Amino acid sequence: MELLQLQYFLTVARLEHMTEAARNLHVTQSSLSKTIQRLEEDLGVPLFDRIGRNLRLNEFGSSFLRRAERALFELEQGKQELSDLSSPEHSTLELAVTTASVLPNILREFRKKRPHIQFHVQMLTTQEMVTLLHRGEVDYCLSSPPIQGDDIECQIVFIDPILVAVPEGHRLADRSSVSLAELRDEWFVGVKRGYGTRDLVDSVCESVGFVPKYVYEGNEPARLSSLVEAEIGIAFIPSTAKNARERIKYLRVENQELVREIALLWHRSRYISRAALEFREVVVECFGALSKQL
């Protein structure tokens, strides 16, 4: 059994489509098919059910996939550890976020301590983040809501009030707070379903008897403020995403505990470099300072 066979198997197992897997791996389909066939011959069992051009992982394949993922995960952790030992000042932190409003401040503070460390940041939905976490493909996730799992460490770093953002001149702009019931007939701008804040807000609104009406649903939370400012709709915006320079009024929500928990997440078995440990300390420090400002 070869390492290349395992790498090819993982890609095919995740995509369950030979053509897409070959394209993803930058190899020919015939070469990929032969590699998978040799692996099945070595194991003595078929790993996939063939359905036309599609593949479906069978019972043998599902069982073997868990072991193969674990084996490659451990090898990758060994590679990361050696890289950290040999060149600790030039490593890369793999980060994923569902909430990016405070990330620039965190990265700026960390760069003061570790100016040569590089970052690779992905903005993801909660489910996409869960997938990367379980695979151990990121150092840290900054997520709202928190994510639980047997292989996931979860540290709550901030309780973030969610506010109602309205444009200047709106009927509620002279208020400091508003009840959810008063927003029943408003039009909203928001992120798509699957983002933690959107799912939380929808759930709380439904609990008081209405479903928010969205005129815009996107995947860039930072754009919502400009849409509110342009009077396209009002929005639920976390306190950490407020921008004092915008012509927007922010109102507290009355009679509801409308807050989101922000958590730092990591895979329990993933190797944590010295730089990653320092990054965690910076995250906690930044949110601690933010809590004192509220």
Image (cartoon, grey):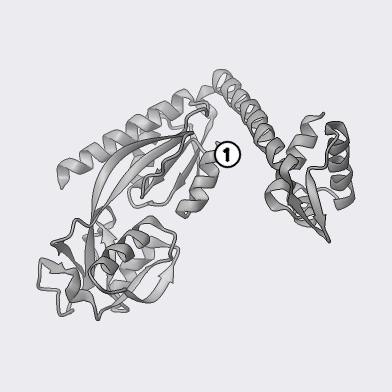
**Quarter residue 229 falls in:** bottom left
Q: Given the current orientation, which residue lies at the most extreme top position?
A: 85
Residue wearing tag 1: 135
Image point 38% across, 61% down: which residue? 221
Q: Amino acid at mark 1?
A: Arg
In this picture, is 210 found above or below 133?
below
Image point 31% across, 73% down: which residue? 212
Front-most of 202 and 98? 202
**Quarter residue 195 falls in:** bottom left
| Image position, residue 169 (x, y; %) | 17, 79
Front-most of 65 and 3? 65
State the count of labels. Answer: 1
**Seen in the image, is 164 located left or right of residue 66?**
left
On the question of residue 61 being in view, the answer is: yes
The 10 Å Cα crowd at callout 1, few under 14, some 14 to 19, many 20 or more, is: some
**Seen in the image, is 194 located left or right of residue 239?**
right
**Quarter residue 75 falls in:** top right
Image point 21% across, 75% down: which residue? 183
**Seen in the image, is 254 located left or right of residue 119?**
left
Q: Given the current orientation, which residue lies at the most extreme front position?
A: 59
Front-most of 259 and 171? 259
Look at the image and tell me in which quarter the N terminus lies. Answer: top right
| Image position, residue 105 (x, y; %) | 33, 44
| Image position, residue 146 (x, y; %) | 37, 45
Q: Secondary structure at mark 1?
A: helix
Image point 67% across, 32% down: which residue? 67
On the question of residue 137 being in view, the answer is: no
Front-most of 184 and 226? 184
**Seen in the image, is 59 located left or right of residue 222?**
right
